[in-house]
Image: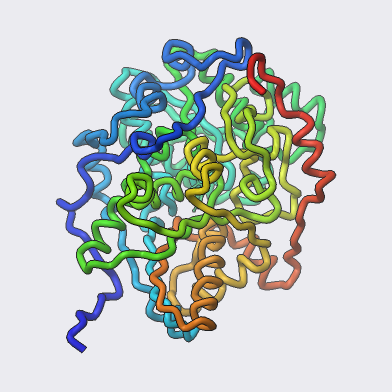
Amino acid sequence: MSETKIPYKIYLTENEIPTAWYNLRADMKVKPAPLLNPGTGKPLTAEEMSGIFCEELVRQELDNDTAYYPIPEDIRNFYKMYRPSPLVRAYCLEEKLGTPAKIYYKFEGNNTSGSHKLNSAVAQAYYAKQQGLKGVTTETGAGQWGTALSMACSYFELDCKVFMVKVSYEQKPFRREVMRTYGASVTPSPSMETEIGKKILAEHPGTTGSLGCAISEAVEVAVTNPGYRYVLGSVLNQVLLHQSVIGLEAKAALDKYGIKPDVIIGCAGGGSNLGGLIAPFMGEKLRGEADYQIIAVEPASCPSFTRGKFAYDFCDTGMICPLAKMYTLGSSFIPSPNHAGGLRFHGMSTILSQLYHDGYMEARAAEQTAVFEAAETFARVEGILPAPESSHAIRAAIDEALKCKETGEEKTILFGLTGTGYFDLTAYQQFNDGVMTDYIPTDEDLAKGFAALPQVPGVE
Ligand SMILES: *Cc1c(COP(=O)(O)O)cnc(C)c1O
């Protein structure tokens, strides 16, 4: 009776934007395995990495020990344009489901790029500028990362060259135009602009591309052009570090009302939003201060956690990138073309891979029609049109809430709503027309990817 009613939206003030990112690795007893040089099988040195990545980002990438990284003022000022992001109590969804569960979501779609990716894009562009670079290269799949990076680059006046997976380039012309509006150049990948692109096209004529191919192209351009470096929007430790702003804000908002989530859910492509959302909670779990059930949700058509192998693998199809020890389907794995729901990367963050391997979190796979059903339910009651990627988390949150309905448990569920789906209307159209299909790779399909896993000298 005297319980304070939790507002629909728990806002923080501008001053409550975190002043430091949290580096989850500092609290991990078993650290994620180091990136390896594919030639020697030895851990990559900062010097080797600095030809590809910006110097400060290399430092962040390799730092397993520093718990907090102060957020530079320029970055924090940029954050103020669209953060703090709201933490929403999903009262309408709870009512619709008739569940005793309490559902909260952290909404990261409140910026033009439409996703959480801007949190890391602005940091990476800032460090490139600090280093005096001319520009950066990258890949983009669905286009959110490319859009976020083009926004950040225009803010810091950097050149931005984006290789966009060909199927998305064709399906999402409007994404491309947003990027060009912010001054980026956008090339469909694989392209004839790089040696690796030509090679991939010769071997697989007519390929619709993959993130792995696009990464190879972007890296090649970065290392062959002076004053350019490559930046990546997910998977890497540095990206999870920047994305910790999501979890830190979510926790600060919940703490205001003394709310402790029981279940924390996020979709997982390369693992950056999930790693960011769970960071401070997982930190408590690792330090033995609290316990949370943490669930990663991935597409059944690209099931790195649930059906992948924990092994060293390339991050790209061209096999020019360093090797990372992660849950992977093999760098040659390309999700079936009917897959519309994003999250199509073959591997997973090394941090999350290690945590999953060590039993600190669980994972489940969702089929895309079930994901779009969840998206529809959510959109109709909560108003926001969710990104297909985010809708994987919605699916699991709804499933957990429905379980509570059966058991009568009043669990508190927190999930990451990573972005909006305005540029995913082709996929929504398929769903609305009833022609969306599910494809789950067979064990044979997956075996091909595993067979091509690299043999690393000195590593089992
Ligand atoms: C890129 C993206 C994802 C997946 O990337 P992660 O690195 O796994 O977070 C999820 N949701 C949206 C909206 C995205 O743009």
Residue 421, horizontal then vertical, whole percent: 52, 60
* 454 to the left or right of 161: right
Residue 161, horizontal then vertical, whole percent: 50, 29
Question: Foreground residue, 36 or 175?
Answer: 36
Residue positioned most to the bottom: 1
Instruction: Give the total of numbered labels.
Output: 0
Q: How is the image coloured?
A: rainbow
Residue 264, horizontal then vertical, whole percent: 43, 60
Residue positioned most to the front: 288
* Residue 246 visible in this rendered orientation of the protein: no
- Residue visible at 42% across and 15% down in the picture: 46
* 22 to the left or right of 424: left
* Residue 108 visible in this rendered orientation of the protein: yes
Residue positioned most to the right: 444
Residue 458, horizontal then vertical, whole percent: 64, 15
The quadrant of the picture occupied by the N terminus is: bottom left
Where 152 falls versus 383 (above or below)?
above
The quadrant of the picture occupied by the C terminus is: top right
Question: Foreground residue, 432 or 292?
Answer: 292
| Residue 204, quarter of picture | top right
* 445 to the left or right of 184: right
Where 275 falls versus 376 (above or below)?
above
- Residue visible at 39% across and 47% down in the picture: 276
- Residue visible at 41% across and 35% down in the picture: 29
- Residue visible at 50% across and 51% down in the picture: 361
